[in-house]
Amino acid sequence: MAVTNEPPLGLQSRTLLQGQITYDQAKQREVNMIQELSYVDARHVFFAHLDRRRNSIRATVARHLGVPPADCTVANQEHWFHGSFNVCIEVEVKRGADVLIRFPLPYRIGEDVHPGNADEKVRSEVATYVWLQENCPDVPIPFLYGFGLSTGQTFTHHSYVNILSRGLQHWRMTHTKSKRLPLLSSYTRTHQSGLDVPYVLIEYIDPEQGEELSRTWPEGRSDLQRRSNLFCGLSKIMLSLARYPMPRIGSLTINDSGYVDLLNRPLTIAVQHSENDHMRFRIREEAEIDPHEQSTHVTVDSYVHDLLAIHGDRLDHQPNAVIGADDALSQANAVVVMRSVWTNFFRRRRGPFFLSLTDLNQGNIFVDEAWNITAIVDLEWSCSLPVEMLHPPHWLTNEALDDIHPQKYQVLHTEFMQIFREIERRQVTEREPASPLLHPIVEQGLERGTFWFSLALMRPPVLCAILYEKILPYFKKISGTSGGSAGFIATLFKLDTTAWLQRKLADKEAYDRDLERTFRS
């Protein structure tokens, strides 16, 4: 009987947010595709929810700006644009600059599992805006007019409120003037919004001000002058952020009184992905832990332990985390090895820590034709991290995370660091001659392997590929040994690895049945 590669009868292509996908393609994906396939309907529901509140959006924007609602025109839904975690709606303003109101996508950040995640995300991003406005005015970011929470609370920049409120806020800021945390922001609580979802209201970046780097990156990245301008801009941003060491690892947040402090758990894409896939939820439900009450980290040890717990959660609870017994053991090995070797890559247990824009990708960077940076948008996922986690962007070679060619990246890393080093030396000479230099630590990222280790820590899906191909080669094999200890190492992942392995294989079988049923429905 002839063998064919045709999918089972009755399985039709399904629609993802990025386009069509077949059953065979879905089976090969490492992420939970049943969850991914649910996003199309979830987006439709959420967009319809916002569309029904267009009048409330218009009224809310008008109040923030101090203009009549009739002066504001909310873009129709077909003109909205969204990324992985936010939807942006342009609002045209008569006799004023256009603005952008941006809403987190609740179905992508675990809001249904942990109500409050969306507010947490907005508070953290707003706090980063405030901190940059105060401490790093040389970092080009859009103006933040205001923001709102799911409770209906709204906050507006003091220059857009009435004279009495403006005077009171000015008095408060004058008497609490300090660049240290907690930091009093320029945002004061104002009206109660008719919206029941959190948002930020920011300046609209006009095409004349620049365009997303992603639009010209594929063909322009081979241009040496453009690259030089981009690397110069990125280096200045990194060095600007590093002028102010942070006391611990975490994310900034703003409270109801307008104060910014480093009190939130370090909120990264890995954390939000994990909670959105209900993995962290299962663990916390068993332990009765409230994720929004998690503390920051004062040592690198506790943070690395928490990151590796996300890897363990994914392997333990994602139904399609493994494709077979060998893959399960390989991934369990990876987690155990990461737990064992991390001290070879991070030397400083209690700092220094610096604010890092962990989502600084080509789509969030606006540049002019010469690739001079004109704006940085989407400040989400910013957090204070160990200095060893500060590196040039991983996307310099334009390759997938698990397929970065070390030699290609080395060339661009060297080019980036030459510019970084020159700028830092010039800045230190002009400002603080006695300041310790950052570039020696960043330069060692590839030499010592901290670049690869940090990347594996922060991106669970690529842990195995990076560990086995990029990290383990830093360790020398002992002469005369066979190295056949993989099976034993995997037993250190769980007390009863055999039972765990059987459960994971059963999980995968159940997932495959559910996925096939999804494509039949």
Image: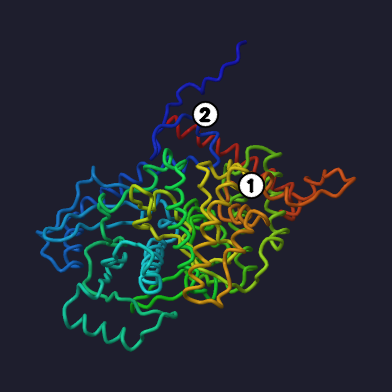
Could you tell me residue 106's position as x and y percent?
Answer: 37, 54
Q: Residues within 10 Å of mark 2 (few under 14, many from 20)?
A: some
The residue where tag 1 is placed is 466
Q: Secondary structure at mark 1?
A: helix
Q: Residue at x 34, y 62 (%)?
A: 141
Indicate the quadrant containing the C terminus: top left, top right, bottom left or bottom right: top left
Question: Does residue 437 sit above or below 89 in this rendering?
Answer: below
Task: From the image, tell me which residue sits under label 2.
Answer: 24
Query: In terms of sequence position, does the residue under pointer 2 or pointer 1 come before the other?
Result: 2
The front one of 248 and 441 is: 441
Question: Would you identify the image quadrant in which residue 257 lies?
Answer: bottom left
Mark 1 crowdedness (10 Å alpha carbons): few <14, some 14-19, many ≥20: many
* Amino acid at dot 2: Asp
Q: Residue at x 45, y 55 (%)?
A: 360
Looking at the image, which residue is at 62% across and 74% down? 350
Q: Is residue 164 visible?
A: yes
Q: Tell me how many marks there are.
A: 2
| Residue 65 rendering spot, x and y as whole percentages | 18, 66
Residue 291 vs residue 512, the one in the foreground: 291
**For the residue marked with disc 1, what is the amino acid?**
Ile
Q: Residue at x 63, y 47 (%)?
A: 466
Q: Position of residue 109 (x, y in %)?
A: 43, 55
With respect to residue 504, does 68 lie above or below?
Answer: below
The secondary element bearing badge 2 is classed as: helix
Q: Nearer the viewer, residue 31 or 94?
A: 94
